[in-house]
Amino acid sequence: MSVRLRNLFMTSAALLALGVAPGGAQPTGPNIVGGNATVSGAGTNSVIVNQTSDRAIINWNTFNVSTGGSATFNQPGSSSITLNRVTGGLGPSKIDGTITANGRVFIINRDGMLFGRNAVINTAGFLATTSDIRNADFMAGRMNFNIPGRPDASIVNFGNITASSGGFAAL
């Protein structure tokens, strides 16, 4: 069994046994580093991002959404993108609540992500990746996700990810 497959199995089994995101675990420490957006409710059960530019980059200390929690992205249009980068180095993101957006949401966590059985994602487009992108490339529309994440990191989905008609979901 490969190291990556073994790590995926062990992580999945442990997180399913323990529950995915502890109560109150929500995105924390937002820092807007590109575009125009505001964040309200960081660290609470309901995080709201209001974005006024077509593209925005938010670096987060953590990006978890606990069971019953939500992260809502209000964007200018369905082609708008919010790039959410986890910079805290505190392990994989655990999503077991709801993420909604009228546009597209990208989440980068070089340590990986787990979408639990209660996770519901409803967006015009959704990307979850361990690979990173340079800010200048993203803001210019060059989707060069060429900065590798941790080699043993994985993305596991037990939830429900939905993209609107003409949209995409990529893990």
Image (spheres, rainbow, N blue to C red):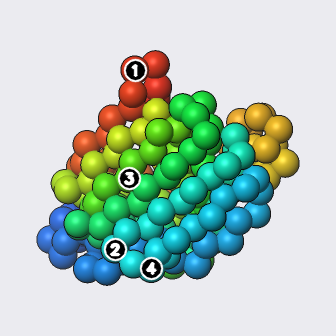
Q: What residue does disc 2 label?
A: 45
Q: Residue at x 69, y 40 (%)?
A: 54
* Cα separation between marks 2 and 1: 29 Å
Q: Which residue is mark 1?
A: 165
Relative to 66, does residue 144 appear above or below in the rendering?
above
Residue 132, position as x, y percentages in the image: 67, 52
Give how far apart the Cα atoms at labels 4 and 3 are: 15 Å
Q: Is residue 75 visible?
A: yes
Which kind of residue does numbered mark 4 sit on?
Answer: Gly
- The CA span between labels 2 and 4 is 7 Å
Point out which mark residue 99 bears: 3
Q: Residue furthest left?
A: 17
Identify which residue is drawn at 67% across, 49% down: 52
Name the side, left or right, on which 69 lies relative to 147. Answer: left
Q: Which numbered disc covers residue 80?
A: none
Given the image, on which type of amino acid does mark 1 rest?
Ser
Residue that numbered label 4 is attached to: 43
